Amino acid sequence: MKLTRDSKISLSQEILFQKLISEGALMHLEIEEYFTVNEIGSIIIALLEEKSHSVQEICSRVIEEYEVEPNQLEQDVITYLQELVDLDIIKVQEE
């Protein structure tokens, strides 16, 4: 499924997340694998722990924390989220 700025994203139920100082650690319970995420990845996962968010909402939150060009950020976030979808870390909700 192709992600768009309106795609609604949620954290997979099989994921445990622990925020570290500037990074985060994910444990995929089903496949018993650990993943690490950088500071921006940590912000995204922490948001998704609370509730589902659209790609646009996620980008807005990251822009609050970092000075970054919005169009480039959106492209980068969509690419990153697609990688997480492929790893079954996050789910795209059907519209």
Image: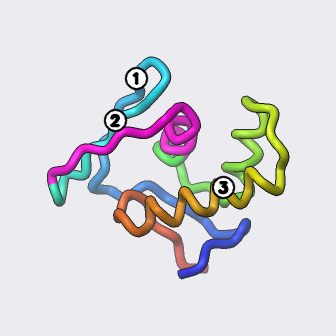
Q: How many labels does the image show?
A: 3
Q: At 49% from the left edge and 43% from the top edge, which residue is drawn?
A: 45
Q: Callout 1, which amino acid?
A: Leu
Q: Mark 1 points at which residue?
A: 20
* Disc with the residue nearer the chain's start (2 vs 3): 2
* Magenta segment: 32-47
User: Magenta stretch: residue 66 in it?
Assistant: no
* Label 2 element class: strand
Q: At 46% from the left edge and 44% from the top edge, which residue is drawn?
A: 49
Q: Quadrant of the C terminus?
A: bottom right
Q: Residue 83 carries which label?
A: none
Q: Which mark is residue 76?
A: 3
Q: At 58% from the left edge and 37% from the top edge, which residue is drawn?
A: 40
Q: Name the residue under label 2.
A: 25
Mark 2 near mark 3, Cβ–Cβ under 8 Å?
no
User: Magenta stretch: residue 45 in it?
Assistant: yes
Name the spot of residue 33 as percent of width and height, x first: 20, 50
Q: Callout 3, which amino acid?
A: Asp
Mark 2 near mark 1, Cβ–Cβ under 8 Å?
yes
* On screen, residue 1 above or below 58: below
* Disc with the residue nearer the chain's start (2 vs 1): 1
Label 2 or label 3, whichever lies nearer to me, is 3
